[in-house]
Amino acid sequence: MHRLRTCAARLRPLTASQNAASFSQHRPAVVHGARRTFQPIRNYTAPVTAEPFLNGTSSNYLEEMYYAWLEDPKSVHKSWDIFFRNANAGVAPGSAYQSVPPMGLSGLSQSQALIGAQPNVEKLVEDHLAVQSLIRAYQVRGHHIAKLDPLGISCVNFDNAPITVGLHQSGFYGLEETDLDKVFRLPTTTFIGGSETALPLREIIHRLEMAYCQHIGVEFMFINDLEQCQWIRQKFEKPGVMQFTLDEKRTLLARMVRSTRFEEFLQRKWSSEKRFGLEGCESLIPALKTIIDKSSENGVENVIMGMPHRGRLNVLANVIRKELEQIFCQFDSKLEAADEGSGDVKYHLGMYHRRINRVTERQITLSLVANPSHLEAVDPVVQGKTKAEQFYCGDTDGNRVMSILLHGDAAFAGQGIVYETFHLSDLPSYTTHGTIHVVANNQIGFTTDPRMARSSPYPTDVARVVNAPIFHVNADDPEAVMYVCNVAAEWRATFHKDVVVDLVSYRRNGHNEMDEPMFTQPLMYKQIKKQKPVLQKYAEKLIAEGAVTRQEYEEEISKYDKICEEAYNRSKDEKIMHIKHWLDSPWPGFFTLDGQPKTMSCPSTGLSEETLAHIGQTASSVPVEDFTIHGGLSRILKSRSLMVQNRSVDWALGEYMAFGSLLKEGIHVRLSGQDVERGTFSHRHHVLHDQNVDKRTCIPMNYMDPNQAPYTVCNSSLSEYGVLGFELGFAMASPNALVLWEAQFGDFHNTAQCIIDQFICPGQAKWVRQNGIVLLLPHGMEGMGPEHSSARPERFLQMCNDDPDVFPKITEDFAVRQLYDCNWIVVNCSTPANYFHVLRRQILLPFRKPLIIFTPKSLLRHPEAKSSFEEMLPGTHFSRLIPEQGSASQSAAGVQHLIFCTGKVFYDLQRERKSRGLEERVAISRIEQLSPFPFDLVKAEAEKYPHAHLLWCQEEHKNQGYYDYVKPRISTTLNNTRPVWYVGRDPAAAPATGNKKAHLLELQRFLDTAFNLEAFQSAS
Ligand SMILES: Cc1ncc(C[n+]2csc(CCOP(=O)(O)OP(=O)(O)O)c2C)c(N)n1
Ligand SMILES: [Mg+2]
């Protein structure tokens, strides 16, 4: 009885507000095909709340029973049938309850005669209500008292209410000790009965405790879907669910041996090396293997994983099965690097392995995506790669490809990207149809206790926002771990939704093997020192059970130790470190066998007149019948049609030509970002909306050719970090896709800075993995204020790896080779044709590099920012630099100013030059590809105007924009023989003024300077 008291006390009734919340949450929308309306509920709640015997405790029970009654009146006790009928009929409070008709009487009319009730039946109802509430309380809160913490020190604070109220005290379920042996009918919302429909209260409590309060804590009652809740109840409540065969237990023990002895081996051999070992959470390895086995059994062929430092080497060795010698040789400091680039530390590298799953005997591909130190940053990348793998194999429901994400407890709760990634999980163009999350919850983050690291009781509460069930499990019980992992894999296979496994464990050492944890967690570590290792505990359990003998166990250990020792000896022969062996996403067939590009050239990116016309026609029409588009859009399409007739393109049409042509050539194009379908500036309109039919849309680009590749254009969630990471992952899966992410305004990219700094900029250098992602960053000083103006070109340029002080050797293949050598390409196109070419070049190059494009805003509609078909025909190319082409170029010797600029300011300069009549004396050259810098073309252009002053003109402030990048490079180009003058705005802290007048004044001021020929004359 004591246990009943304490448990029931801690599982005290939900508060009124909790009841209210759950009442509306659990209201299913449809019953047997018919829509459930709120009407009957309203009818019944009014009298029900007035019933003296129905307090807040019982309303949950009523709710469940009421739904059951709505579906089938016979499914509830007769007394309740009568009660609900009366309540629905609007009987006055206090009168709805009638006792059950005696034998022989049936039907409402007879029972109506029985108003007045027998008191013992009333008590029976109350007791049933109490039992129901108790059952529900275990389902909701059983995890509060489950024995989840192997150390027994967890002080998770679920709420601040006292938990000392006993069963005997009033206000509780009303059950008494004498009720323990009474038999109660079980509601349909529990499976503890197995084949029995009624049980004594004592047994009910026992079974609930076994289901919800042992080593597994199940959090699921917040899930909105009744079927899903029932599914979970069934998995944990059915008597005898947690039973394992002898084989299963022995396999589990063998996996624990591998997991444990791997870390011990590393510790023996390299005691002073950081490895972020798994000690204290060794059951992570069987956990992952169970998930993979079960998923393979359910048809999954490809598992993509992302994980942080903790236990990573162990996962590589024992889950992905990377050769041990390849791992061990990483500890050898004398290893020579075979690849160019920086490389990375061993616990960041990725891996790809195709093999046979030993349990299912089916082929399975496992990959672990390389990641930076930045915790959780890899989450969206893994999702994007998973989505792409699903897309390329036509796996529309995620039956064949899935992802597993591992997390640390502190990072899972603390890093916002976790939340942002969860919010992608159910979006049509981003869902991967369920991710299994495994938290290695060692109850500490570096030196910080959970109470200082998060405000939620569990590290996993973030998962509740997407209704993911959360299975907390004591990681010192490997069988419980195996059980929840099986359920998690089945959940994903059944519902295709995310699920979380929280492995509550501890960290036997410090944050890394060199750290002293006693400095900061003395009591925790005193406890940890007393803790028997989980392998030892489990082995003893199995030996005691007779599942294995001690000798077998010891043999298993020495077998694995021998494997490690032999691999260690082989690893000594490894002299060279090949990061290529650690590639997570190989692109078979794209490179030569040595991993080199097949050529060092790029074909023309131009298109035939017919292709241009055909794509232009698609861009100007509605390809489906009976589809009414908005009148304003009709005008836009008409003007596009006119442009096509006149053989010209604006920005949107240039983009259309690039995308459309690549699609026709079989290249998948995916454009993602906030409001990209229409385009933030309402210029794109890639998705048409029927004005008369809700949600009827049409993407004309998908109607060009029956053999074309599909076009994906998708408005994204409002998460730059998550979505850019996702697209980067998508682009990782295959080189044969143009994957673009567009920022709403360029400055918003800084909330995705981690993806840019840690993955896009140095990705190839660290992980020899190329990536052709394209960033479209709207940029330009349009008087829109400090925000919305600058995409911060200076930041991208500062991270380019081309040397400002070395004039490169100009070879025949220079233009392509410098692209090959760079870490990314940064362009600012001033014409639609050049934008078209650079997009196409991205795919026609024999290798992949990230491409950063500063895209215009006012140029989208600028009458002069148009290109002719002539600039896009076969034989044409992207222009790295657009030289002066007007009269100044005809009389070069007399030119006094050669202005180098980039992007939109060209049009301001051109207009000003014209208005001052300086066309012959001032030349303007546009550097379209900022990085890698077109040294050869700048040289030729400067030499053409030997008497001209060289100016760099930009609209951005001096400490921003391009100046710091171009200045040394122009000087190097000219061997420092001619000065480069700066013309533009003064240095400033904010990117732009918020005052329109000040903006125009600043513009005029620097234009005046640019064309002040006398001032420069006297300065020289
Ligand atoms: C974004 C980010 N911030 C800070 C760090 C530094 N750091 C490395 S591990 C760690 C603690 C992580 O704790 P947890 O997520 O619980 O993982 P554990 O090490 O306990 O397995 C911190 C703060 C980091 N790697 N990434
Ligand atoms: Mg931790």
Image (cartoon, rainbow, N blue to C red):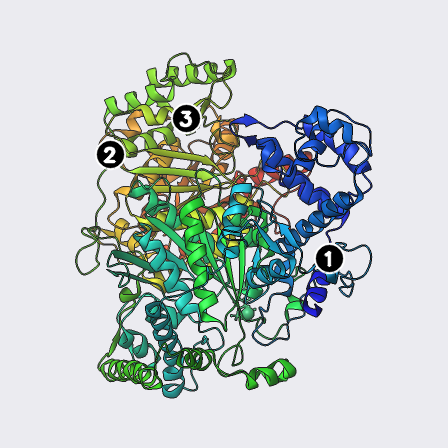
Residue topped by disc 1: 12
Q: Which residue is painted at 69% across and 26% down in the image?
A: 108
Residue topped by disc 3: 650
Where is residue 285 shown, x and y percent of the image? 40, 69
Ligand 1 within 8 Å of the CB at mark 2 = no
881 relative to 581 in the view: left or right = right
Q: Are marks 1 and 3 in contact (CB under 8 Å)?
A: no
Say which of 997 and 184 sits in front. Answer: 184
Where is residue 379 shown, x and y percent of the image? 46, 55
Residue topped by disc 2: 665
Say which of 322 and 27 sits in front. Answer: 27
* Tag 3 secondary structure: loop
Q: Which residue is painted at 33% across and 29% down in the image?
A: 657
Tell which tag, 1 or 3, sits nearer the viewer. Answer: 1
Q: Residues within 10 Å of mark 3 (few under 14, many from 20)?
A: many
* Tag 2 secondary structure: loop
Q: Which residue type does callout 3 highlight?
A: Asp
Q: Which residue is painted at 41% across and 26% down in the image?
A: 650
Q: Quadrant of residue 26?
A: top right
Q: Earlier in the sequence, mark 3 or mark 2?
A: 3
Where is residue 954 shown, x and y percent of the image? 52, 44
Q: Please say whether residue 345 is visible from this viewpoint.
A: no
Q: Which residue type does callout 1 highlight?
A: Arg
Above/below status of 380 relative to 34: below
Q: Which of marks 2 and 1 is nearer the N terminus?
A: 1
